[in-house]
Structure formats: structure tokens, C-alpha cells
């Protein structure tokens, strides 16, 4: 069964602003182009642009400016996945060049990929076979800090306590 993720980041960021960042639901490459125009995004090197994304509980892909918090992009809701997505925008089509599960607000697992793949396939966007960069998040049972596990080293960067092998970011101390 697919896990869904509650927001677990800083409470300060969880408050959905009165004017939350513009977001767009993506059902086609045209939706990506429209979002680019409406939000004044500019394409960088390689005609690429990176956005914040979430997949909502209905499997819908939402994107927002990359400086937006995921919880804002999700309007405070639960998600099936979240991270950063890089679109390559060519005259002939839009493809997803890179995707990561980098969201310290939701700490989604690499195993959340199928939700991303399904949304991109439904929108007809070419995509990679998996996250191009994977993050492994764990909450320290000792001090409560959420860590990114680096190179398989399951140790808290703040207090040195061992981190569990199983995903635990939703649990409280
Ligand atoms: Zn710790």
C-alpha cells in the first residue's frame, strides 16, 4: 500500500498564507507551458526550469515556484510524494529531466516514486525511470532532529545517536 505523508516540518511554515504561492496542476505539457508563462519563470541552461512539486492524495501533480515550501504547494494537505522536479521545455515537447524527493517538510521515502511516475505518465510527460536524486530521511530517536542519511551512514548529524533503518519521520519522540 502507498504511504501518504503528513507535513512534519517547522510549524511556522505550515501555516498556509493568505496569499499562498501560485500553484498549477499538471495534466499535460501545455499545463507546464502555461505555468511558465503565468508565473514568469525563465528557462535556464538547457532550456530547463526546476519547480517544487507535490502529489496529492488523488494522485494529482501540483507544481509551484521552486522557492515555495512544499506544504504551501500542498495547501497544508497530505501528499503521496514531494520534492523538486526539473522540466526541459523544448518547442516540440516538455520532458521531465530530473526529479528528487527532496522535501524536508514531508520527508517522503524514495519508495514514493510510483505516485510520481503515475502522475507524469497520465500527463504524457517523458520521465526518468526513478528519482534522479534520492534522499533518505530519518528522525533521530535521541534528539528529534530530522536527518538526511548520507552514504548509508545511519547516524544523527546532531547528537550521534544511531538512526533506525525503517522510515520514522512521522513519529513523535
Ligand atoms: Zn540526534
Image: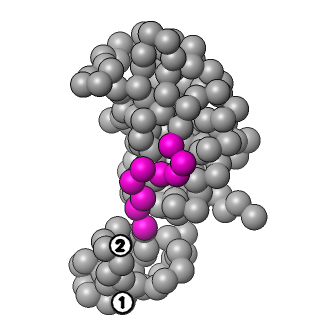
Closer to us: 46 or 115: 46
Closer to us: 120 or 128: 128
| Spot occupied by residue 3 in the image (x, y as percentages of width and height) | 67, 62
Q: Secondary structure at mark 1?
A: loop
Residue at the disc numbered 1: 162
Residue at the disc numbered 2: 149
Q: Is residue 168 magenta?
A: no
Task: Confirm or reject: label 1 Cβ below 8 Å from ligand 1.
Answer: no
Provide the major secondary structure of the magenta segment: loop
Q: Is residue 132 magenta?
A: yes
Residue found 49% across the figure and 28% down from its top: 95
Q: Is residue 85 left or right of residue 49?
A: right
Q: Nearer the viewer, mark 2 or mark 1?
A: 2
What segment is highlighted magenta in the picture?
Answer: 128-136
Instruction: Kindly report the distance in space between the C-alpha atoms of the residues bearing marks 2 and 1.
Output: 11 Å
Res. 75 visible in picture? no
Task: Name the mark on residue 7.
Answer: none
Residue found 48% across the figure and 33% down from its top: 96
| Spot occupied by residue 20 in the image (x, y as percentages of width and height) | 46, 29
On screen, 70 above or below 143? above
Res. 49 visible in picture? yes
Q: Secondary structure at mark 2?
A: loop
Closer to us: 124 or 17: 124
Q: Is residue 85 left or right of residue 6?
A: left
How was the colour assigned to the protein in this rendering?
one colour
Image quarter (top left, top right, bottom left or bottom right) of the N terminus: bottom right
Local packing at callout 2 (Cα closer than 10 Å; few below 14, some 14-19, many 20+) is some
Q: Quadrant of residue 147?
A: bottom left
Q: Are marks 2 and 1 in contact (CB under 8 Å)?
A: no
Amino acid at each position: 500500500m502507498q504511504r501518504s505523508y503528513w507535513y512534519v516540518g517547522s510549524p511556522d511554515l505550515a501555516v498556509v498564507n493568505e496569499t499562498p504561492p501560485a500553484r498549477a496542476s499538471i495534466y499535460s505539457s501545455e499545463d507546464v507551458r502555461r505555468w511558465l508563462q503565468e508565473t514568469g519563470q525563465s528557462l535556464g541552461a538547457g532550456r530547463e526550469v526546476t519547480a517544487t512539486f507535490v502529489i496529492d492524495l488523488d494522485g494529482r501533480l501540483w507544481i509551484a515556484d521552486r522557492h515555495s515550501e512544499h506544504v504551501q504547494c500542498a495547501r497544508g494537505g497530505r501528499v503521496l510524494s514531494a520534492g523538486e522536479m526539473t522540466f526541459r521545455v523544448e518547442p516540440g515537447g516538455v520532458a521531465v529531466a530530473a526529479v528528487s524527493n527532496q522535501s524536508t517538510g514531508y520527508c517522503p521515502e524514495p519508495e514514493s516514486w510510483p505516485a510520481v511516475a503515475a502522475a507524469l505518465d497520465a500527463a504524457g510527460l517523458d520521465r526518468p525511470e526513478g528519482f534522479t536524486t534520492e534522499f533518505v530521511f530519518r528522525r533521530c530517536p535521541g534528539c528529534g532532529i530530522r536527518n538526511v542519511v548520507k552514504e548509508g551512514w545511519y547516524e544523527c548529524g546532531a547528537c550521534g545517536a544511531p538512526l533506525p533503518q525503517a522510515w520514522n519521520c512521522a513519529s513523535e519522540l
